[in-house]
Amino acid sequence: MNTATSGTSSAALPGLPESALTLGALREQFAVSRQDLILLSVLPPIAAIGIGAIFFVKMLAVVPAAPWAVWLCALPCIGISLIIAREGYRTLTKAHARSGMRVLLFDEGFISFRPNDVFSCRWDDVEWTRELFATIENCPIWEGLIVHLRTGQEWTLDRRDFLRDSSRLAATIQQDVARRMLPQVLADLRKGQTLDFGAIQLTLLGIMHRELVLSWADLTAIAPHGANFKIQRRGAWRAWATIAARDLINRFLLLAIVEAMRSDQRN
């Protein structure tokens, strides 16, 4: 369940680490979905029984109804059911182990509570964020988010944490980090400093990828395409470059800077 508690100061909330007392007002809470845990408790055994029964009936239709044939059909059905039940049990065990997880989102950062672990983060302390994706049958599947602090500490949000609205939480964290970093890094870029975003770099001249540079004047768009980003060049129908989203850091900050530099070009 997500609960918005606007205006509640972190100093007024019990059980918080001392480092979290200056994070400002609480905006939202993210917790493990109890409904999902209930579904995970019920669905694996039902699926195991159902698939085993269907397989058993189909096998009986093609073999004689002798006792030995019935057992011959039953054994693989039982095996399939046990395999499905085992995988369901593993998933359920992981889910219950993380059932105490919750994330509190504040104006100045966030706090993550996991069993035996509390992680406190201020937006000003974040060095980079990176989204994780998997591809199944050419379809991108969001896997999680890594938040890397300037101290070297990292916090990972995984979709298997069963946190409700975890993808929205990941987007919100990245947006807040980008808003906090944008004024300084944009000023650095305009002074001639090169900004590193993983697979691409931004310079005063334009976007650099594998030692090739696309000028700001020739850039028309950087647009998401599945689990990738396509960089479009003016006058070209093919993408100038295709970058895997997992190879980029600070994606939201990157897009904000690109929009600011393109705005400079228009003006």
Image: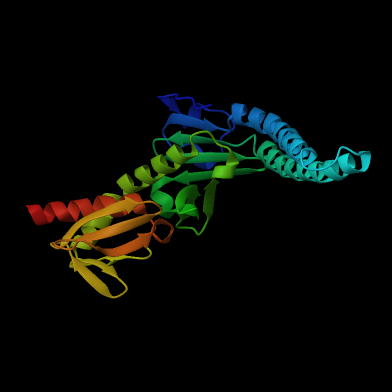
126 or 241: nearer the eye?
241
- Spot occupied by residue 250 in the image (x, y as percentages of width and height): 37, 54
Applied colour scheme: rainbow
Q: Is residue 171 visible?
A: yes
- Spot occupied by residue 101 in the image (x, y as percentages of width and height): 60, 37
Q: Is residue 121 above or below residue 1?
A: below
227 or 261: nearer the eye?
227
Q: Residue furthest left?
A: 267
- Asked where in the image residue 96 lies, by quadrant, the reply is top right
Give the residue drawn at x 35%, y 62%: 243
21 or 119: nearer the eye?
119
Give the residue drawn at x 87%, y 37%: 65
Q: In the drawing, does residue 116 fall left or right of residue 5? A: right
Give the residue drawn at x 44%, y 25%: 4
- Number of marks drawn: 0
Give the residue drawn at x 35%, y 53%: 251
Q: In the drawing, does residue 95 fall left or right of residue 217? A: right
Q: In the drawing, does residue 42 fall left or right of residue 103? A: right
- Spot occupied by residue 38 in the image (x, y as percentages of width and height): 66, 28
Q: Is residue 196 visible?
A: no
Q: Residue furthest bottom?
A: 211
Q: In the drawing, does residue 232 fall left or right of residue 69? A: left
Q: Is residue 99 above or below residue 267?
A: above
44 or 14: nearer the eye?
44
